[in-house]
Image (cartoon, helix red, strand yellow):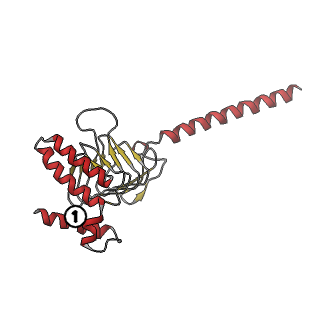
């Protein structure tokens, strides 16, 4: 696909996703997400040619003007849409499929100083909502959604909705997931810890009550 057809395709996605978009002229000049994507394509070309410094310079200039930081090494598919975009961060080894949507404040980052593939893979048609953090070399499956503010550190299968901190699956293949089943798919250590503490409190209350009854019987 030629460069101008690709640019028009990018703008067409804006009209599909954003009801506030009115004209191609407006979209071309005022949508920071679009500018960030176009800048990334240029930076990525230099990155693939191992002109890393020039690629990073282009990336940082784009970050300065758009508030969106996309590492030039990230691989991004077609019809990618960033809504508003301020605060979006996309790491070096991210792989993003086609028809993916990100909202402002999303981080596709790593979890430390590990080498190699250390950032997420986002499959086709995924949607990641405002403020969500997807961390590590994990995969977000096709047609899956990550809720606003969620923190996802484990793989998400296709056709799922994930919410919470840490992220847990609440809908899979259109069916609501019961929280008392299939725990390995939706780990919630905070909830487990609270339950453990509540069990210990109940046990202590029972022991105190038993001692009170014993003292009353002695008296």
Could you tell me residue 10's position as x and y percent? 22, 64
Q: Residues within 10 Å of mark 1 (few under 14, many from 20)?
A: many
Residue 13 seen in the current view = no
Vertical comparison of 19 with 2: above or below: below
Residue 134 visible from this viewpoint: yes
Q: Secondary structure at mark 1?
A: helix
Q: Is residue 216 left or right of residue 78?
A: right
Residue farthest toward the bottom in the current orientation of the protein: 22
The location of residue 105, given as percent across then percent down, is 38, 52
The image quadrant that residue 86 belongs to is: bottom left
Q: Nearer the viewer, residue 118 or 184?
A: 118
Q: Is residue 29 above or below residue 110?
A: below
**Quadrant in the picture for residue 103:** bottom left
- Horizontal side of residue 153 vs 193, given as left or right: left
Looking at the image, the residue that sits furthest to the right is: 219
For disc 1, the marked residue is 10
Q: Position of residue 36 (x, y in %)?
A: 26, 55
Q: Closer to the camera, 128 or 91? A: 91
Q: Residue at x 13, y 46 (%)?
A: 46
Residue depicted at 40% across the width and 42% down the height: 184
Residue at 71% of width from left, 34% of height from top?
Answer: 205
Is residue 3 or residue 123 the one in the foreground? Answer: 3
Position of 115 compared to 204: left or right?
Answer: left
Q: Quadrant of the N terminus?
A: bottom left
């Amino acid at each position: 696909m030629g460069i101008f057809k690709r640019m028009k395709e990018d703008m067409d996605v804006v009209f599909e996703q954003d009801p506030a978009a009115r004209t191609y002229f407006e979209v071309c000049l005022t949508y920071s997400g679009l500018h960030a994507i176009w800048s990334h394509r240029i930076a990525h070309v230099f990155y693939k040619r191992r002109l890393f410094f020039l690629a990073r310079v282009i990336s940082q200039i784009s970050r300065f003007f758009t508030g969106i930081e996309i590492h030039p090494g990230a691989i991004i598919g077609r019809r990618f849409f960033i809504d508003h975009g301020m605060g979006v961060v996309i790491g070096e080894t991210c792989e993003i499929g086609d028809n993916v949507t990100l909202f402002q404040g999303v981080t596709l980052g790593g979890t430390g100083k590990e080498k190699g593939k250390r950032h997420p893979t986002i499959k086709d048609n995924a949607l990641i909502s405002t403020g969500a953090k997807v961390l590590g070399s994990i995969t977000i499956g096709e047609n899956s959604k990550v809720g606003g503010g969620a923190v996802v550190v484990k793989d998400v299968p296709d056709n799922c909705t994930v919410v919470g901190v840490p992220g847990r699956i609440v809908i899979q293949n259109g069916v609501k997931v019961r929280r008392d089943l299939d725990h390995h798919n939706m780990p919630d250590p905070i909830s487990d810890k609270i339950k453990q503490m509540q069990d210990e409190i109940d046990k202590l209350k029972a022991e105190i009550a038993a001692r009170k009854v014993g003292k009353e019987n002695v008296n």
